[in-house]
Amino acid sequence: MLSLRINDWVKAVLTHVAALYEAHKKIVLACGYLHADETPLKVLDESKKGTTHQGYYWVYHNSKGKLVLFDYRKGRGREGPDDILKDYKGYLQTDGYAAHEDFDKRAGITLIHCMAPPNVH
């Protein structure tokens, strides 16, 4: 019976955390000027104890509000930014990675790239 109550507590907390995440995401994306980049990370693989797989944090930085949104994805494809930025309007600054290429064709988005020289990654 105790485990049932603990599960209910965890579920209630996760419901509130999910709502907090969505509110935070809305604030970050409302800024009108956003930096976006992805970074690899090793993720513990629950199917094979002691091993990891490659995952990615997609990071969206609202420099005006000094806020950062992290979005974990298993891959580096454009599905992540497409999902997060589907309603975004404003300037989007990226490193020129191919997953961001089509954003300059979207109404309301001005795509700009960083000033880093080629092949410095």
Image (cartoon, rainbow, N blue to C red):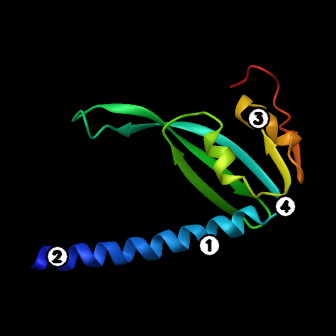
Q: Are marks 4 and 1 in contact (CB under 8 Å)?
A: no
Which mark lies nearer to you, 2 or 1?
2
User: Which residue is at 39% across, 32% downward?
Assistant: 53
Instruction: Inspect the image, locate mark 2, and give the three-letter code of the amino acid beneath it.
Output: Leu
Question: Marks 1 and 3: CB-CB under 8 Å?
Answer: no
Disc nearest the viewer among 4 and 2 = 2
Q: Determine contact: label 2, label 1, CB under 8 Å.
A: no
Q: Quadrant of the C terminus?
A: top right
Q: Which residue is mark 3?
A: 95
Of marks 3 and 2, which one's residue comes earlier in the chain? 2
- The quarter of the rendered structure image containing the N terminus is bottom left
Disc 2 target residue: 4
Dot 3 amino acid type: Asp
The amino acid pointed to by label 1 is Ala
SS of the residue under disc 3 = loop
Q: Position of residue 58 (x, y in %)?
A: 60, 45
Q: CA distance from mark 4 to mark 3?
A: 18 Å
Distance between the alpha carbons at the discs numbered 1 and 3 = 27 Å
- The mark that comes first in sequence, 4 or 1, is 1
10 Å crowding of disc 4: few (<14), some (14-19), many (20+) = some
* Residue under pointer 1: 23
Residue 33 on image: x %, y %: 83, 57
Numbered mark located on residue 32 in the image: 4
Q: CA distance from mark 2 to mark 1?
A: 29 Å
Q: Secondary structure at mark 4?
A: loop
